């Protein structure tokens, strides 16, 4: 892949990469670091990309790997400073849905974010997360079901007030 096509792709998917990083890391500084390192890794290995039509999933996979690396480092360091975390951006002005989505485990949240917020296909999610398409569908189904349960509980609590 030549420099110009790589640069054009990075510009096209810049917001997508930031959304993916934020969905995994919930920290602006870590997101910036993850995206920067992922793009550096992608730049270094851009000639290995065989199918340029798959660049979206390829960049996303590199970023997901980098985010996992940052999460492992956090876990080892037991770094949990809430003051560094920013509130997540609102989800179409639907705070109950946004809050419920944030409470989902990452393995259920990521396929939903990639599919419904970023427009990924099942195949692209499968490639980006390196899990079978059936697992993507299963996790999306579980995630939707749990979101529904959480939102139903919130709605019931709101009725009681």
Image (cartoon, rainbow, N blue to C red):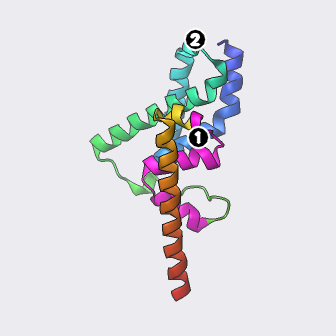
Q: What residue is disc 2 on?
A: 47
In the displayed structure, 150 sits above or below 134; it is below
Residue 51 within the magenta-colored segment of the rendering: no
Q: Position of residue 86 (x, y in %)?
A: 51, 54
Residue depicted at 55% across the width and 77% down the height: 155
Is label 2 or label 1 in front?
2
Q: How many marks?
A: 2
Q: Position of residue 9 (x, y in %)?
A: 68, 26
Q: Position of residue 12 (x, y in %)?
A: 70, 32
Residue depicted at 58% across the width and 16% down the height: 49
Q: Is residue 109 left or right of residue 9?
A: left
Residue depicted at 64% across the width and 44% down the height: 118
Q: What residue is disc 1 on?
A: 18
Compute the Cα span from label 2 to label 1. 23 Å
Looking at marks 2 and 1 on the same chain, the residue that comes earlier in the sequence is marked by 1
Could you tell me what secondary structure mostly forms the magenta stretch? helix
Residue 106 within the magenta-colored segment of the rendering: yes
Residue depicted at 55% across the width and 32% down the height: 60
Q: Position of residue 151 (x, y in %)?
A: 53, 69
The crowding category of the residue bearing disc 1, from other C-alpha atoms within 10 Å (few below 14, some 14 to 19, many at least 20), is some
- Badges 2 and 1: C-beta atoms under 8 Å apart? no
* Magenta range: 95-123
Between 13 and 29, the one nearer to me in the picture: 13
Which corner quadrant holds the N terminus?
top right
User: Is residue 122 in view?
Assistant: yes
The crowding category of the residue bearing disc 2, from other C-alpha atoms within 10 Å (few below 14, some 14 to 19, many at least 20), is few
Q: Is residue 122 left or right of residue 29?
A: right
In the displayed structure, 114 sits above or below 34; it is below
């Amino acid at each position: 892949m030549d420099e110009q096509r790589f640069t054009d792709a990075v510009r096209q998917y810049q917001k997508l990469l930031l959304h993916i990083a934020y969905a995994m890391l919930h920290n602006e500084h870590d997101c910036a670091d993850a995206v920067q390192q992922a793009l550096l890794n992608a730049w270094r290995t851009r000639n290995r990309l065989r199918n340029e039509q798959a660049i979206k999933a390829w960049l996303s996979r590199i970023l997901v790997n980098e985010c996992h690396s940052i999460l492992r480092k956090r876990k080892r360091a037991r770094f949990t400073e809430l003051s560094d975390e920013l509130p997540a951006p609102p989800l179409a002005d639907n705070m109950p849905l946004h809050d419920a989505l944030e409470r989902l485990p990452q393995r259920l949240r990521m396929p939903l974010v990639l599919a419904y917020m970023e427009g990924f296909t099942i195949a692209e999610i499968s490639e980006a997360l390196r899990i079978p398409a059936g697992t993507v569908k299963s996790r999306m189904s579980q995630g939707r079901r749990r979101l529904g349960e959480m939102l139903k509980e919130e709605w019931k609590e709101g009725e009681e007030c």
